[in-house]
Amino acid sequence: MPQTSTGDTAGFESMRGELTGYCYRMLGSPFEAEDAVQETMIRAWRARDRYDERRGSPRTWLYAIATNVCLDMLRGARRRALAMDLGPAAEAATGLGAAAPEHTWVLPAPDSRLLPADASPEQLVVQRETLRLAFVAALAHLPPRQRAVLILRDVLCWRAPEVAALLGCGVAAVTSALQRARATLRAVAPAPSQPLLPLDDTQRTLLAGYCAAFERHDVDALVALLHTDATMSMPPLRWWLRGRDRIRAALLDPAGSCAGARLVPTAANGQPAFWQTRPALDGHHTPFALVLLDVAGDRVTGITTFLDVRRLLPLFGAATVAGAASTR
């Protein structure tokens, strides 16, 4: 452990990004993840004189604190979810219903706050895959300690004895928890959307075509890029659709027209993402929704549009988003 207060602070801060990614997977909210990391830093600072390097590295120590913070926050909390977890698909584009509270949802987060800057390309593949909205929602089905074990073992590649030391249990208990967690994920998690970012030429062409069709409001061209069984949802609404025909009907509904809107690329949850913007009275485009896409092969398999972005914008840099939208 660094010996000076300045060194302690620098050491703590150098781990903020990876700890945020860990806490986000545990909690499903970028806001709660940042709160958890801040609480971790406070607890670590207050306990720095009691750190014993014989019991593990500073990194292990910080992860142990972060895990306890997350477990405390999850005690009594409701499971965060996506719309597909909350009920059956709607039969039509009408009757959207009331919005659900923010704590209902797995919320999106910018890659820049979750991905470690020093990760190898191979590590980034795993990191991105395990940040997808669908994967984070699947993690929420696990009991909190199983969730921690699976993230530490299968995402961060910790060894079983390291996880056992962190959680204060035996290796056999870690192995058992991991087996149960994997079984649950196999039952609830969808198949991975492949290929993962960075996209190849086929996926880049797909996304360019999607954006072009969206911006000229060419519903038929856009729907042609969707998988037959594609889904569309719009948190905080519980309403969601499955299938190209129903999505087409929803996009053609004049009440929900996106004519004049633009899509501005961003990076969220390791998957293709765009700010949806519309012209304001002064002619400048302002963001009003955040769209995350799932892709498989040469088709879009899922469209998740977050309609309430007031709290999300500062995470991504509101000024940067507005500037990018206005200069297109």
Image (spheres, rainbow, N blue to C red):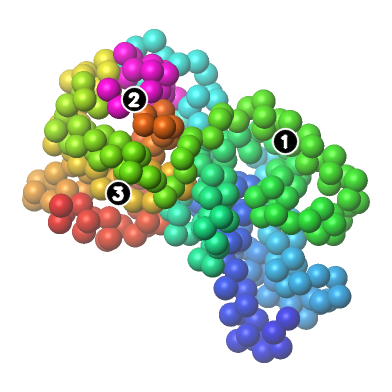
Q: Tell me the quarter of the image containing the N terminus.
A: bottom right
Dot label at residue 226: 2
Dot label at residue 182: 1
Label 2 Cα crowd, 10 Å radius (few <14 / some 14-19 / many 20+): many
Q: Can residue 114 be found in the magenta stretch?
A: no
Amino acid type, callout 1: Arg
Amino acid type, callout 3: Pro
Q: Position of residue 62 (x, y in %)?
A: 70, 66
**Relative to the observer, which residue lies in front, 119 or 287?**
119
In the orientation shown, which residue stands out farthest toward the front? 201
How far is mark 1 from mark 2, CA to CA? 30 Å
Residue annotated with mark 3: 265
Q: Residue at x 35, y 48 (%)?
A: 310
Q: Is residue 92 visible?
A: yes
Q: Residue at x 65, y 81 (%)?
A: 8
Q: Is residue 196 above or below residue 115?
A: above
| SS assignment at label 3 | strand
Asked if the residue at tag 2 contacts the one at tag 3, i.e. Cβ–Cβ closer than 8 Å, the answer is no
Q: Residue at x 73, y 50 (%)?
A: 153
Label 1 Cα crowd, 10 Å radius (few <14 / some 14-19 / many 20+): some
Q: Which tag, 3 or 2, sits closer to the chain's start? A: 2
Q: Can residue 230 be found in the magenta stretch?
A: yes
| SS assignment at label 1 | helix
Q: Is 154 on the left-hand or right-hand side of 251?
A: right
Q: Which residues are magenta?
A: 224-247
